[in-house]
Amino acid sequence: MKEKPLATHKTKVKELIFDTPPSFKKLNCPACAAAIAAADINIQDKLAKCHSCAAIFSFEETFESLVTRAPIKQEVIRPEGIDIFHFKDALDITIQQPLTALEGIALGLIPMLSIMLTGIYFAKDIALVVPVIFWLLTALLLYNLFTRSKQKIHLTVEDGKLSLFWRPKKFHQDRHYNIKDIDQLYVKGMAGYCNVYMIFDGENGQRHIPLIKGLDSLSKARYLEQELEAHLKIKDRAIPEELK
């Protein structure tokens, strides 16, 4: 967001309670709007006769809407590591930065190499500068690890734009998208992690763009999908690539 709201004006989003859609429908005459009695309904042929105006009509679409009703998507409660705020018409979501694959590899290798190179130095086979450099890298990695609670991803919706900021950046460029071009959001699994994707209407057709990758739980990914679709008024639909 361009201007951060004062804390006293921030309002945490209340958990929403969705009513379960009814599993029944009442039939009314399309001509006179009179209620149709059960005795005047032919379930086999999907035809009904109005007792008031004698109109005969098909209710096949109404019947099919009950039979093929889409499964209800369960609401996801806000998981730990995600904060969400509304301020006027803007949305501000703050996410704990996930540990990247590169950071994980570096944490496993650099300290071990530092110890090995120190042993080689005392064996008089290398210059002192080599193990010193690796110990400095180890210290930097440990500092990064212990300050992870302050490392955030900021996802904002404001002024017709969806924006994504990593702070610190860690080589991630700030990104901005026109919300009118966002068609759908979905969750995709990969290598044990969950990623939030969006379908973006580009000049040459639709593109599937990774919005946030490397989330350590399905609940976080589903929650982000749920809140963004609700705020952007996007009706959720099944995507072939999404995690079932």
Image: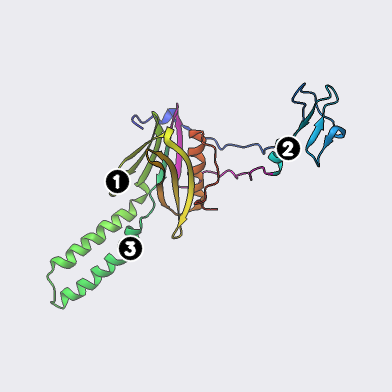
Disc 2: which residue: 60
Q: Classify mark 2: residues with Cα within 10 Å, few (<14), some (14-19) or many (20+).
A: few
Give the main secondary structure of the magenta stretch: loop
Res 50 quadrant in image = top right
At a point 13% along the width and 68% down the height, the residue shown is 128
How many angstroms separate mark 3 from mark 1 (CA)?
19 Å
Residue kind at label 2, given as amino acid type: Glu
129 versus 2 height, above or below:
below
Q: Residue at x 12, y 70 (%)?
A: 127
Q: Position of residue 75 (x, y in %)?
A: 58, 43
- Kindly state the secondary structure of the residue where label 3 is placed: helix
* Real-space Cα separation, disc 2 to disc 1, in angstroms: 56 Å
| Residue located farthest toward the right when viewing the structure as drawn | 39
Of circles 2 and 3, the one toward us is: 2
Q: Which mark is residue 169?
A: 1
CA separation in Å, label 2 and label 3: 59 Å
Q: Would residue 154 be found to the left or right of residue 27 on screen?
A: left
For residue 105, the mark is 3
